[in-house]
């Protein structure tokens, strides 16, 4: 799912629940801390949230949203923080990429997630904020992602105009009550988001009914293509 800018409203909860954010790399064939076939996906992340619901047309939040992680490079400033390459808002800038091709333990060590208080409620989605597009600037002036697919000799830069990603839905919805302590995990499989095959029209692969974000031709008969991975949410008690 795509969204332009996440519209976030925070609600303080005196008797709230506690949530911690994590990522889980479910991609197979890892060797020496990277994917064996050379697949790589590095991106910048500002924050992660829980959302009660999401409008399927506008992609705006419906109901309450609660932050569960903020990038340490933001210095605690969610309002002013943005990824490097945007002019507005006037605040800290994120310059580091999260390498999603590494084992989960290494990715989560970089996240350095803390337990954050969230309001009790029923939440259907987790959302990841990747940038803030203000003042008519729709894309950053520096790459927001770096990627490589099997057979590519080097990573390629990519600048995305999508400022957020919405997870698949919690099934059933995540219900939090006062005193709960949970870890919210977004699982992803890079093998389904970075693929290789025969070139197709535009940014596609022959026989694959999907328009990718970017492609790189390896030779006349082989192409690697990239899109954001789907994030599958889960929750476990701490």
Image: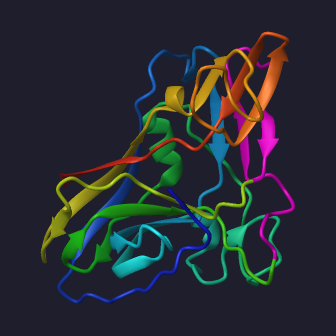
Give the residue drawn at x 21%, y 53%. 171
Q: Quadrant of the C terminus?
A: bottom left
Does residue 121 belong to the magenta stretch?
A: no
Q: Relative to 161, is 106 on the left or the right? A: left
Q: Closer to the camera, 122 or 15?
A: 122
What's drawn in magenta, residue-wise?
137-159
Would residue 148 be seen by someone viewing this image from the given angle? yes
Q: Closer to the camera, 198 or 143?
A: 198
Give the number of callouts. 0
Q: Quadrant of residue 89?
A: bottom right
Does residue 152 belong to the magenta stretch?
A: yes
Would residue 154 be seen by someone viewing this image from the given angle? no
Q: Relative to 212, is 29 on the left or the right? A: left
Give the residue drawn at x 74%, y 80%. 134
Q: Closer to the camera, 110 or 188?
A: 188
Q: How is the image coloured?
A: rainbow
Q: Where does residue 144 sit, x and y in percent of width and height? A: 73, 53
Q: Is residue 14 above or below residue 148?
A: below
Q: Where does residue 199 sit, x and y in percent of width and height? A: 75, 20
Q: Relative to 57, is 162 on the left or the right? A: right
Q: Relative to 15, is 5 on the left or the right? A: right
Give the residue drawn at x 79%, y 84%. 135
Magenta stretch prevailing secondary structure: loop
Q: Quadrant of residue 37?
A: top right
Q: Closer to the camera, 92 or 23?
A: 23
Q: Where does residue 98 sit, x and y in percent of width and height? A: 61, 46
Q: Is residue 171 above or below residue 24?
A: below
Q: Quadrant of residue 150?
A: top right
Q: Where does residue 68 sit, x and y in percent of width and height? A: 39, 67
Q: Is residue 222 above or below residue 216?
A: above
Q: Is residue 154 above or below residue 1?
A: above
């Amino acid at each position: 799912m795509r969204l332009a800018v996440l519209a976030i409203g925070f609600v303080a909860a005196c008797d709230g629940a506690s949530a911690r954010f994590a990522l889980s790399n479910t991609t197979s064939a890892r060797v020496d801390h990277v994917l064996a076939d050379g697949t790589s996906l590095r991106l910048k992340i500002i924050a992660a949230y829980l959302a009660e619901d999401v409008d399927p047309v506008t992609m705006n939040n419906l109901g309450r949203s609660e932050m569960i992680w903020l990038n340490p490079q933001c210095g605690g400033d969610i309002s002013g923080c943005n990824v490097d390459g945007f002019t507005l808002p006037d605040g800290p800038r994120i310059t580091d990429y999260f390498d999603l091709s590494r084992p989960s333990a290494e990715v989560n060590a970089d996240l350095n997630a803390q337990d954050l208080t969230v309001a009790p409620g029923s939440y259907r989605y987790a959302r990841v904020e990747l940038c803030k597009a203000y003042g008519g600037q729709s894309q950053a002036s520096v790459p927001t992602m770096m990627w490589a697919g099997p057979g590519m000799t080097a990573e390629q830069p990519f600048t995305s105009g999508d400022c957020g990603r919405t997870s698949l839905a919690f099934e059933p919805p995540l219900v939090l009550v006062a005193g709960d302590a949970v870890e919210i995990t977004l699982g992803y499989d890079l093998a389904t988001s970075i693929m290789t095959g025969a070139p197709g029209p535009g940014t596609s692969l022959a026989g694959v009914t999907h328009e990718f974000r970017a492609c790189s031709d390896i030779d006349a008969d082989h192409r690697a293509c990239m899109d954001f991975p789907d994030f599958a949410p889960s929750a476990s008690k701490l």
